[in-house]
Image (cartoon, rainbow, N blue to C red):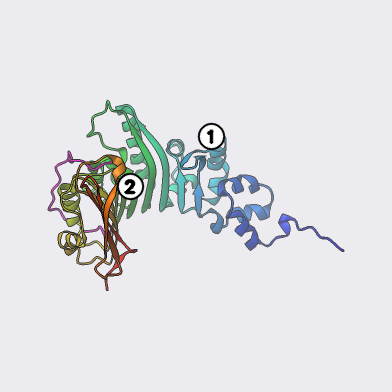
Amino acid sequence: MNSSTVHLLDLPDEMLIEIFNKLSTVDVLNSIWGVNQRFDRLARDARLTHSLDLTAEQSYDERCSMSDVTLDRLCSHILPQIHDKIKSLFVEPSSMLQILHFIKYLSDNSPVLHIFKQITHLEISTIEYYNSRSQIHLNTKIYTRLFSVCQRLTHLKVNGKHLRSYSLLPEYALPLTMCSSSTIIKLEVNVRTIDDCLRLLDGRFNQMKILNVIIESIDTPLLNIDSQYILPNLTGFCLTTRNPTQEYDNVIVPLLRRMEHLETLMLFLLVGNRPEFIDDVHLSEEILIHMPRLEKFIFNITTIDDVVEIDYWLKKDDIEETMIFNDGLPYFQCRIDIFKNGIGRCRLCSIPSIESS
């Protein structure tokens, strides 16, 4: 029987690109750059280099900066050769700080500077520590510099955790919420408080059409926001709360009523100590009636009618009675659990969404 050996260079370009796309793009670029003319040509292929991840995996849910050696080689040798192909970046703040510090010394026609001037999509993975006012000011400068350099940035996702010293005043804002941009169309971000969210909607991102926000806690806001100010450009809004809130009627409902032009709305809420459960009638009469253009509504809202321990939100035992309603309608389900101590819990969710006809 004759046997044959297939070498990597024997494979066609299309197959090589498909293989490379299953690997880390940065690792591929570092491995093939400078090997031969064919690999250099493939490294410039937009299918391979249109999106770059400049982070390294630290744990199953956290990213960190790549090594300085790798980052320096990318900035000095590789990025200048592929700058016209890159459309989106995934970075970690310390890398971003290093890159922004590096490019301020570059001339206006530098290929690396051109990368950031043409970037439209950027994702930042971060753990931001705020143990002092100086750290907050430093991170604010990073975002300010970012928006000044990335002149075509339309989509920004900040996927991070915010660890704040309790010695800082609670009204101290997240750095991102102290910046502004006239190019951002879609913003996805985690924030600490409802005040951070309100700052993002105060006009500093005046072209923003879509805001997806995860809020750590929703308490009484410190900001005095005009509840009558309509948000004219916002067409998509997703709100997720990590912790239960008792400010649904005072904060969330007035905020949603400012979004008259929404086409897509997603709500994932935990509402505590509310005597009346949030049901489909409430959503229709108090919120949806103010959104005549709404086409899609996805929601999962749990209400508990008392002040309870955190385990009640997922508690499966000590339930005396359970009732399930959907009124014969296919797009939502309402489940009410009554615990033996009389506390009630209502979960209202879409299946999977409400689509307008």
Q: Nearer the viewer, residue 344 or 280?
A: 344
Q: Is residue 142 among what the camera can see?
A: no
> Amino acid under label 2?
Asp
Give the residue at x 20% y 63%: 291
- Which residue position holds label 2? 317
Quarter placement of the C terminus: bottom left
Residue 341 percent coordinates (x, y): 22, 45
Give, as a single range, the part of the protein colored magenta: 216-237
Label 1 – label 2 distance at C-alpha: 52 Å
Query: Which comes sooner in the sequence, label 1 or label 2?
Result: 1
**Circle 2 crowding by C-alpha within 10 Å: few under 14, some 14–19, many from 20:** few
Residue 68 percent coordinates (x, y): 53, 34
- Which residue position holds label 1? 68
**Residue 218: in magenta span:** yes
In this view, which residue lies farthest toward the bottom?
A: 357
Give the residue at x 56% y 55%: 48
176 up-or-down from 87: above or below: above
Q: Is residue 33 among what the camera can see?
A: yes
Give the residue at x 54% y 53%: 49
> Amino acid under label 1?
Asp
